[in-house]
């Protein structure tokens, strides 16, 4: 093996360093003028709208009490499966049973009085033609019968009211579902004075749920009924669930000067893994292209340095929706501006429309001045575009 002398080793090291420096300036795939480029390709690109929402049952019923009293018994608890009409709670009926008996007694008395008044009227009708009773007596008897019959009607209504209140002591489920909330215990007194006290919340069917998501006003114009949705929850961070937009509500909500619109997303939950109240991070697929020309978003942010040389002078102003990208010009050290119309974006890449860029390399960053320490000098003094 031949041993190199110190001078030869020094020259070899200098050549290696120069080669590495040249590679670093070129960005690995760009020219020696210090630009990094990438090829424009075709492929699938999808645009999403993100939001945060809350999972809930499609139908949740709050079961309350229409009467006041002490809770005598509970026949359902958290997570209990209940059917429509099933007894789930009882209120102590003692007071309402007594009220019903009192109303029934008052009705019986009113009915007896009405019978007596009718008999009295019949006698007056017989005596009046014989002048044994005056017309005034006949009219008075007729009026007393009408009053007695009206009193019977009132007492019957009181009995019906007392019976209904007694029936309200037995609280039944209005729907088939699952109890997701119980807010009372046995022995607790509920007062149905101004508002109805809530005893249970029943989710009708948690195998079918929905997400109520708050979508910002900047994105709501892209959201449509029927669009596909993917979402995650903190309980299952590695699992992606799916749903469908079912409703976009036009009523705005303003929080800290941020306007959002409620969007309802239908979700299937056959395994009952998702619980009401979970926070969902939602991603709505609003647009998708399967054969799109796309460039990295970094190419849209390239800003040539002052005095950059352009193969063709770039436009001084762009129309709405137009974007400017650059390729490397044929003249060494120059850039070629290309005007395209931007399509959809996934946040990493953007679709390019109305420009012939397929297969070319576009600049994604400018890392240094041209080789030799010079600067880009525009032919004819063409200015950079005003965006």
Image (cartoon, rainbow, N blue to C red):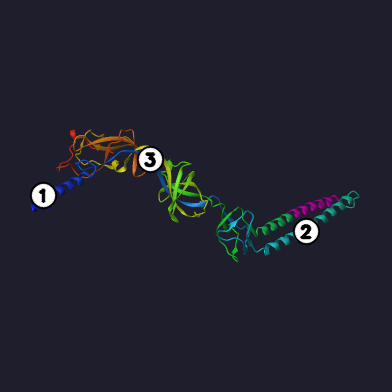
Determine whether, in the image, residue 372 is placed left or right of residue 152. left
Above/below status of 323 relative to 92: above
Residue, x 39% and y 38% (percent of image)? 290
Q: Residue 85 shows which numbered tag?
A: none
For this orientation, the residue located farthest to the right is 130
Q: Position of residue 125 (x, y in %)?
A: 87, 50
**What is the crowding at mark 3: few (fewer than 14 residues within 10 Å), some, or many (at least 20)?**
few
Examine the rendered structure and indicate whether residue 310 appears above or below residue 194. above
- Mark toward the viewer: 3 or 1: 1
Main SS, magenta region, reads helix
Cβ–Cβ under 8 Å for marks 2 and 3: no
Name the residue beneath numbered marker 3: 44
Mark 1 Cα shell of 10 Å, populated few (<14), some (14-19), many (≥20): few
* Secondary structure of residue under mark 3: strand
Residue occupying the point 34% across, 42% down: 349
Q: Secondary structure at mark 1?
A: helix
- The answer to whether any part of residue 218 appears in the image is no
Q: Quadrant of residue 162?
A: bottom right
Rendered image: mark on residue 11: 1
Q: Earlier in the sequence, mark 3 or mark 1?
A: 1
């Amino acid at each position: 093996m031949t041993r190199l002398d110190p001078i030869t080793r020094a020259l070899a090291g200098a050549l290696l360093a120069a080669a590495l420096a040249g590679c670093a300036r070129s960005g690995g795939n760009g020219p020696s003028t210090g630009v990094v480029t990438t090829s424009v390709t075709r492929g699938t690109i999808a645009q999403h709208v993100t939001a945060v929402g809350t999972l809930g049952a499609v139908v949740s019923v709050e079961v309350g009490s229409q009467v006041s009293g002490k809770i005598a018994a509970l026949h359902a608890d958290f997570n209990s499966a209940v059917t429509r009409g099933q007894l789930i709670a009882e209120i102590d009926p003692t007071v309402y049973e007594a009220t019903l008996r009192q109303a029934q007694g008052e009705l019986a008395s009113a009915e007896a009085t009405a019978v007596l008044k009718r008999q009295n009227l019949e006698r007056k009708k017989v005596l009046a033609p014989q002048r044994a009773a005056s017309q005034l007596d006949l009219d008075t008897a007729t009026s007393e019968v009408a009053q007695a019959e009206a009193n019977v009607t009132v007492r019957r209504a009181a009995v019906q009211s007392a019976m209904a209140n007694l029936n309200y002591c037995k609280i039944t489920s209005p729907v088939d579902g699952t109890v997701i909330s119980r807010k009372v215990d046995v022995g607790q007194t509920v007062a149905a004075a101004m508002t109805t006290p809530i005893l249970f919340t029943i989710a009708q069917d948690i195998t079918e749920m929905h997400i109520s998501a708050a979508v910002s006003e900047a994105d709501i114009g892209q959201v449509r009924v029927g669009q596909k949705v993917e979402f995650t929850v903190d309980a299952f961070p590695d699992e992606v669930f799916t749903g469908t937009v079912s409703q976009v509500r036009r009523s705005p909500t303003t929080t800290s000067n941020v306007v959002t619109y409620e969007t309802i997303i239908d979700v299937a939950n056959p395994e009952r893994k998702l619980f009401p109240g979970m926070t969902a991070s939602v991603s709505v697929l609003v647009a998708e292209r399967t054969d799109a020309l796309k460039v990295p978003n970094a190419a849209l942010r390239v800003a040539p340095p002052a005095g950059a040389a352009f193969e063709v002078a770039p436009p001084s102003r762009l129309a709405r929706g137009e974007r400017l990208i650059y390729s490397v010009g044929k003249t060494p050290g120059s850039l070629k501006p290309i005007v395209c119309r931007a399509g959809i974006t996934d946040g990493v890449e953007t679709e390019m429309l109305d420009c012939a860029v397929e297969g070319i390399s576009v600049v994604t960053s400018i890392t240094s001045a041209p080789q030799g320490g010079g600067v880009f000098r525009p032919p004819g003094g063409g200015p950079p575009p005003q965006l």
